[in-house]
Each structure stands twice: as C-alpha cells, then as structure tokens.
Image (cartoon, helix red, strand yellow):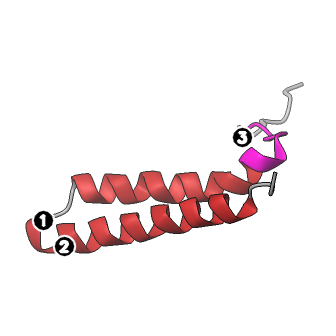
Amino acid sequence: MSSPVKSPSLPLIRNPLLRQEFPWLVSEVVLLLILFNANPPELWFWLVVLLVVLLYRVERWWSSRPNA
C-alpha cells in the first residue's frame, strides 16, 4: 500500500515579530531583485519605491519603540 504524497510545507514562524515583519522583508527583497534587473529609465522609479518602503519601516520601528 502506498502512502499519500505530502506537499512540502513551509516551516511555521514561531516568533511573532518575525511573522509580522516577514511580508515586508519579502517585498523588500523582491524590490531589490527588480532593481537589479531594471533598465535605466525605470531604475529611478524602483529605487524611489524601495526607499519609501524602507523609510516607512524605519518610521514605524522608531514610533513603536518603548518610551524609556
């Protein structure tokens, strides 16, 4: 008797902070890959998009830190 074939599953991320940040990290890596393959006219557009995303993440990180 053959066993059912299991599809490979991604490991569950247990750290809640990493789970929360994972989509942003993936989007930043995708934007970097787009930047590496961009032609000169669209290079500036994607660079600005990446900088806006990074600045947004830094601002959110800065505003969420504890007020010690």
Q: In which quadrant is the N terminus drawn?
A: top right
Residue type at mark 2? Glu
Mark 1 or 3 closer to N-term? 3
Label 3 vs label 2, nearer the camera:
2
Most extreme residue toward the right is 1
Task: Classify 10 Å Cα crowding around label 1: few (below 14), some (14-19), many (20 and above).
Answer: few
Most extreme residue toward the left is 40
Badge 1 vs badge 2, beta-carbon distance below 8 Å = yes
Q: Which mark is residue 10?
A: 3
Residue in the image at 33% along x and 52% along y: 33
Residue type at mark 1? Asn
- Total marks shown come to 3
> Element type at marker 3?
loop
> Element type at marker 2?
helix
Label 1 vs label 3, nearer the camera:
1
Left or right: 67 as drawn, with respect to 31? right
Task: Classify 10 Å Cα crowding around label 2: few (below 14), some (14-19), many (20 and above).
Answer: few
Q: Which mark is residue 42?
A: 2
Task: Classify 10 Å Cα crowding around label 3: few (below 14), some (14-19), many (20 and above).
Answer: few
Quadrant in which residue 9 is drawn: top right
Q: Which residue is at the front of the view, 30 or 48?
A: 48
> Element type at marker 1?
loop
Quadrant in which residue 14 is drawn: top right
Report the span colored magenta: 10-18
**Main SS category, magenta section:** loop
Q: Which residue is at the front of the view, 45 or 39?
A: 45
Residue type at mark 3? Leu
Left or right: 45 as drawn, with respect to 40? right
**Which residue matches tag 1?**
39
